[in-house]
Amino acid sequence: METVKYTLTEQQMPTAWYNIQADLPAPAPPVLHPGTGQPITPDDLAPLFPMALIMQEVSQERTIEIPEEVQSIYRQWRPSPLYRARRLEQALDTPAKIYYKYEGVSPAGSHKPNTAVPQAYYNKQEGVKRLTTETGAGQWGSALAFAGALLGLEVLVFMVKISYQQKPYRHALMNAYGARVIPSPSTETQAGRAILAEHPDSTGSLGIAISEAVELAAQSDDTKYALGSVLNHVLLHQTVVGLEAQAQLEMAGDYPDIIIGCTGGGSNFAGISFPFIGAKLRGERDVQVIAVEPAACPSLTRGIYAYDFGDTAHLTPLVKMHTLGSTFVPEGIHAGGLRYHGMAPLVSHVVQLGLVEPRAEPQLGCFAAGLTFARSEGILPAPEANHAVKTVIDEALRCKEEGTSKVILFNLCGHGHFDMQAYMDYEAGKLRDHEYSQEEVAMALAGLPVVG
Amino acid sequence: METVKYTLTEQQMPTAWYNIQADLPAPAPPVLHPGTGQPITPDDLAPLFPMALIMQEVSQERTIEIPEEVQSIYRQWRPSPLYRARRLEQALDTPAKIYYKYEGVSPAGSHKPNTAVPQAYYNKQEGVKRLTTETGAGQWGSALAFAGALLGLEVLVFMVKISYQQKPYRHALMNAYGARVIPSPSTETQAGRAILAEHPDSTGSLGIAISEAVELAAQSDDTKYALGSVLNHVLLHQTVVGLEAQAQLEMAGDYPDIIIGCTGGGSNFAGISFPFIGAKLRGERDVQVIAVEPAACPSLTRGIYAYDFGDTAHLTPLVKMHTLGSTFVPEGIHAGGLRYHGMAPLVSHVVQLGLVEPRAEPQLGCFAAGLTFARSEGILPAPEANHAVKTVIDEALRCKEEGTSKVILFNLCGHGHFDMQAYMDYEAGKLRDHEYSQEEVAMALAGLPVVG
């Protein structure tokens, strides 16, 4: 069975990111200042982010140029390959045509360097010396550590304590790149100390780790904060994935009927889908888009669409998003990159507009799908990506049932080489499915601030 | 600092492997039958290998065509990139030009699939249903498991017991690809049972694992044996690395003054260097070639050049090679892929001919070099590859001292994502250097059969 790979030359690489805000029929609701309840201004965000990123956050321009130095670093692993999954199609005996973009070729093994590099670049440009961030599964922390090493910035990572303990190899990778990794909650911040005073045994959460990273960044002029998902500028940087896929599918002579991505904070999903959703919004071409989240952390399918904080200590601005409540601590599933209480405001907005269909998947079926993929395509996906793979297989089998040959595109956002414990636990029968009921979610939402 | 990457199109990929046997001034000494002391015949090898591979083993043709199906699978990750290490050059402030071929882009993360795929292919062609093999660090076992999954062959891996215990994630990866992994010595073979009877606590060695895999293959018609290094046909398949590098350096307008590779069994070293050594042998272009082995397993620098067995139970034919004795069990260094008592006969032969300069490096300096590389180039090398990186840095600093601008090429044969424990132990100061003295080696060699 032939490998079918579509490779762009470096000259064909996108030179600008795509900003979906330019094509939205209605703008996404504004971010609010938690004190005043008024829309925040760029100045409000200046303690945390360099001005170039703040301007991207609010930009309404359709395209934003990728700086030459960022393009140059992208070229280390980009353009990433687009594959036709011929062996998977054969294994499923489906008439569907399945394409996947593979982001595991980056040195950190996932799509995260697509935004880590420009974030480090703009901070460096504005004289920042140190970046703080949080990480759960560790993919984002590794990516920022990589970008910091290449651009000469110090990186300080607050890693959710349970992940720090369970995934020593992930923080070893960050250390190898020269970053400092601190298990969160820690005694290094007010937010961390407050949590530890109340819950000395706290194993942490992304929300807590964000509080710690934000607190340190806000205190010091040469230190800023970097976030690996959720924000508009992060999603913007990831569109390089979808833009490349558009050019590669053109080479293949195909256009997707269905696009599928897994969603945690929303960045890899937005990266693959936003350029296509933009074409749909501009009336150029229709497409069905599916966002797949874990049933154990179902913000899109079971959360409410409301203003909420991005962190547990309520240090961030208020953003309107699908949320399970900022104090929600999701089940310890292995797809750690999808364990976030909220969803990117832009992803929430396109779901509200009916442009994207959300689905939730329990983890066991996702692992089974991942192994089917590994044994046919030869690449072992990260547990996060398995949520997309599961849905791709479902849709391909539906095509078989219906006798239709749809074109399916998905983003294989990372490899699973740092997630072997998850596969071992799965094979040993140690994992179980957990689905949050509407009642449980309602309880989790009880603490939500009521705004807007 | 700009990324400089040289990418071949798929059309520019090599369509034939390069066989150095065609250009050698004297043929390598023949492989001997251990019973008769006479050169072995293809028929002697038929229980273990498919005839196509046996014919490659003894071929004197300069080029051997890569089957179309193998080329097609290669295209999943090949051509692999050649990078100019501009950031490393800057970090070292050297006038040397450093290029590296990066084989970590394969789905198994190393150069090993370059031979795993054709070996699985030829076996499949000849009706074989099952492959047995051994693995130490696990890179080879993962690669054969990957190839078996893609080509529909069962794979049975005997994994050195100490590695099986220390590297659960490596066998988890093989399992994910559908392979069965057995810690060696095992009770499944005569060879394993004999070792266990004498040493119930044996932690195994590559030599023992080879005995087990060979024994099972010899017993069954639909089962053959696959080896990840040492043999001529394995080295042949790896020349795709050096052939691509030749084309890429031509794009760069450079030719290497120095080629550096790490050596365990010899396959990645041969892969990068043999096409260039061939050009030298044909009088086309001179080149200095350095083979770097661990000081803890110094077959080329401290072993003797003599006939020896490839395995501990003495089931393999006798090959003339640099060896520390087939019962030698090297120190448990983390560069598990370099812990083999012998050296590929063809690599030994070119060393004997004075075409290659061997060096031995203790591990601590290699880890330090690997971290320097990771923080400048953004890729964390496997501990094996660090031996090459250490020597590259030494040579680049020598250029700085001498004020010469040499062109240095090396093979970054794999990433270190499965070797994070090694980096953690290094950072924690738990590793030490062990260098075998000539006396220790003499003792290890005492058990060597005296032939030829």
Image (cartoon, coloured by chain):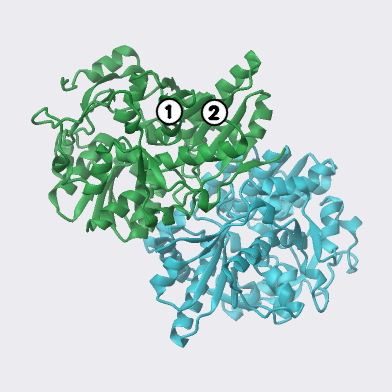
Chain colours: A cyan, B green
Residues A367 and B251: in front is B251
Q: Amino acid at mark 2?
A: Pro
Q: Residues within 10 Å of mark 1 (few under 14, many from 20)?
A: many
Q: Is residue A392 above or below residue B227?
A: below
Q: At which x and y percent is residue A291?
A: 61, 73
Mark 2, secondary structure of its residue: loop
Q: Is residue A22 above or below residue B187?
A: below
Mark sitting earlier along the chain (2/1) = 2
Report, in whole angstroms, how far the alpha carbon at label 2 lies from the one at label 1: 11 Å
Chain letter for mark 1: B
Quadrant occupied by the N terminus of chain B: top right
Determine which quarter of the picture holds residue B200. Answer: top left
Q: Which residue is disc 1 drawn over?
A: B277
Q: At which x and y percent is residue B418?
A: 46, 44
Residues A225 and A83: in front is A83
Mark 1, secondary structure of its residue: helix
Chain letter for mark 2: B
